[in-house]
Image: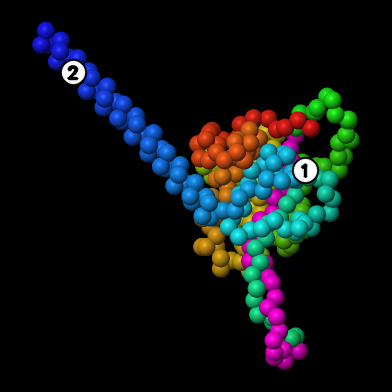
Amino acid sequence: MRRVWAILTSLSLLAGVGCSSSYDIRMNKTLEDMRYRKRLDDNLMPAPTKGKFEELLVFVRPPKNLEPAKEFLLPLTDPTKFDLEASFLEAQKVDAPPPSDGSPAAEGAKPVEVQKQSLHILGRVKRPKNPNAKKKAEPVNRGEFVPDVLALLNAAYAPAELTIDKFKETNKKNNKFKQHSFAVSGKNVQVYLYSPKGDPYEVALIFEYPSKEHGTLYSKIELCLESFALGKKARSAFSGAVGDEVTGEGGTGGTPAVF
């Protein structure tokens, strides 16, 4: 009898240890998610929730201090090429430059605003058709997404010559991109292309900032790319989910909304 009681006591202790271990794991995971959420909030802006971003289920949190620009800031010769185009901008005030003739700046000259950093986003989404909606004519002047993006960037950042073979695959948490960075006119430009084969989403994120700001902005750009979400995962992110609640195993986590 004593032996039976000893066995039961041992099993109870093991069960208690197991429950405690499981609780500690869950608690540590919760604390880790809270710390990560705080990092996101400290370094990133809220995701835009109006217009095309939420309609298309594209979730992007720009780096801190980047505000939506009134219009897309790169030369867009044909707006029908993309379903989404948006720019975010941080400007800073600096002293007005002296006149070009070499004379000193006028007393009381007002500071001028110059661009400190910016983020440009281009996207296409292949969404299932709504059989009840009126038929819309498909754009006829679209080529493949990546070549169309590179053509736009080559026009905007000449003499840069971007070709897809210069891009390397990179992972940011569970998001997979093709990435290429280059310098032009004292600025760093980082281009990230999300265009997996068979995925209904194709998105380009273009970060632009003064070269001397790289150390300051690097972690913010990394977090922006980590929190990037599309489709079903974007819907969860818009509702406030974060971390593994959103990212799962990568991809869009579902089909886009119906037209």
**Within the image, what quadrant is residue 20 found in?**
top left
Quadrant placement of the C terminus: top right
Asked if residue 123 lies in the magenta stretch, the reply is yes
Q: What is the span of residues highlighted in magenta in the rendered image?
A: 101-126
**Distance of label 2 from label 1 (alpha carbons):** 65 Å
Q: Closest to the observer: 196 or 213?
A: 213
Q: Position of residue 11 (x, y in %)?
A: 22, 18
**Within the image, what quadrant is residue 158 found in?**
bottom right
Relative to 110, does residue 173 appear above or below in the rendering?
above
* Residue tagged 2: 9
**Within the image, what quadrant is residue 255 found in?**
top right
Specify whether 220 is left or right of 117.
left
Asked if residue 35 lies in the magenta stretch, the reply is no
The colour scheme used to paint the residues is: rainbow
Q: Position of residue 186 (x, y in %)?
A: 63, 69
- Is the residue under label 1 in contact with that under label 2 (CB below 8 Å)? no
Three-letter code for the amino acid on which mark 1 is drawn: Asp
| Picture residue at 68% right of the left edge, 70% below the top | 114
